[in-house]
Image (tube, rainbow, N blue to C red):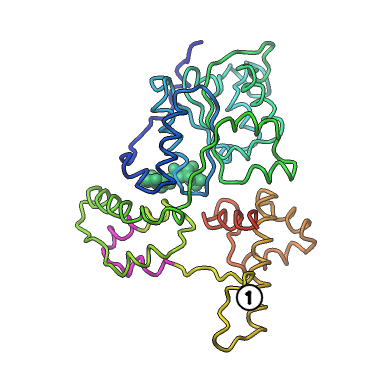
Amino acid sequence: MSTSNPVSSLIQPLGEMPPEAVIFGGTDVMRSLRERLAKIAGANVPVLIQGESGTGKDIIARMIHAASPWKTGPWVKVNCPAIPGTLLESELFGYEKGAFTGAFGMKPGRVEMAHRGTLFLDEISELDMSLQSKLLQLLQDGQFCRIGAQEDKKVEVRVVCATNRKLEDEIASGTFRADLFYRINVVNLRMPSLRERASDIPELVAYFLEYYNRKFNSRAKPLSADLMNAFAKYRWPGNVRELENLMKRYVILGTEESISGDLRPHEPDFFSADISVDGPISLKKITRQAVHELERKIILKVLQHHHWNRKQAARALNISYRALLYKIRDAGLPSNRAARRPEADEGNQTVAAD
Ligand SMILES: Nc1ncnc2c1ncn2[C@@H]1O[C@H](COP(=O)(O)OP(=O)(O)OP(=O)(O)O)[C@@H](O)[C@H]1O
Ligand SMILES: [Mg+2]
């Protein structure tokens, strides 16, 4: 199979990555991840990478490719949510001339471009059911069909998938095929949140400080012990990405005040018995806050489930569209999918785990 020219622009360079010592740090959870990665990189089996947003799923996927026997082959990444549903099929599988109105010539898909290399499907839960079936066929026998083609084609491709959703929940709600899940989940890598590896924070801070000082030709000083303490206690809903962004801002603006305000306090857990009863308590206030928090979590989960379609979400919640818009604003939730912040996904996971 040949990979012709229009295709090569979609094959992404592996790009600059932090050194391995920084990526993995020193915690046990990351050490075992590194060992697992070394074992699986060479085996041609699909890998599913799961983890909250900003935990490094992209980095790990690229490392799998770089450590695999197909490292000289193409690295093709498909960001599933970024391509509108109707286009995704032709992007992935390509089409023949005349397959649909506007198909003036044939176009190979990204599956073909990844021949003898790695196909990275990011946010796999966004594939609709019909594309899930086509992907299942590809994983079962290496075959797929361009849109409008008479015959199947065969490719040799290593498939790596990533998601920040709990696919088990998607299966339960009927939006993800269980058989596909078992196919892509031959080997699973779970990326720990930054909270679970808080002892790696100083090393990451030192790395990002040096990196951005060099990049912006700055001389920002190491962080104070107080701020490092605050970092250690913070929940990091956006994980390493959030830490990296804070460090970038610190280097550009040069003062600790420019970032310390962003370290939002822990969300109080109203549903555990941890609430301090030493001092006076306002039962009314606590109950109101708890109801508010529960409402926020439910709305977020329903919005996620309906792919941020607010009309459908309002129907599912049995409230009016206007009431939902008001509640979204009131709860400080992002108004649409594009504007959603990493914490929105994190919030969803919290609900899913409940
Ligand atoms: N372990 C790590 N070491 C160094 N940098 C990291 C690490 N993990 C993430 N980063 C940095 O954080 C940012 C986000 O990482 P990445 O895109 O891999 O996360 P992700 O899990 O794919 O997030 P999303 O679910 O939002 O796609 C990148 O700039 C990356 O360089
Ligand atoms: Mg990613």
Residue under label 1: 289
Total marks shown come to 1
Depth check: give the residue in front, 88 or 194. 194
Where does the image place residue 293, in percent across and percent down from the top left? 63, 69
Where does the image place residue 182, in percent across and percent down from the top left? 65, 31
Where does the image place residue 296, in percent across and percent down from the top left? 65, 65
209 horizontally vs 90: left or right: left
Vertical order, 206 against 1 (above or below): below
Vertical order, 156 against 196 (above or below): above
* Amino acid bearing label 1: Gln
- Residue at left offset 67%, top offset 84%: 284
- Residue at left offset 50%, top offset 68%: 266
Q: Is 106 colored magenta in this rendering?
A: no
Vertical order, 251 against 91 (above or below): below
Q: Is 261 colored magenta in this rendering?
A: yes
Quarter of the image where one finds residue 198: bottom left
Where does the image place residue 143, in percent across and percent down from the top left? 63, 16
278 horizontally vs 242: left or right: right
> Please, what is the dominant secondary structure of the magenta stretch?
helix
Q: Quadrant of the C terminus?
A: bottom right
- Residue at left offset 58%, top offset 41%: 81
Depth check: give the residue in front, 292 or 189. 189
Please report the bounds of the magenta region as a residue range: 247-263
Q: Residues within 10 Å of mark 1 (few under 14, many from 20)?
A: some
Quarter of the image where one finds residue 331: bottom right
200 horizontally vs 295: left or right: left
217 horizontally vs 165: left or right: left
Vertical order, 121 against 260 (above or below): above
- Residue at left offset 45%, top offset 57%: 195
| Label 1 element class | helix
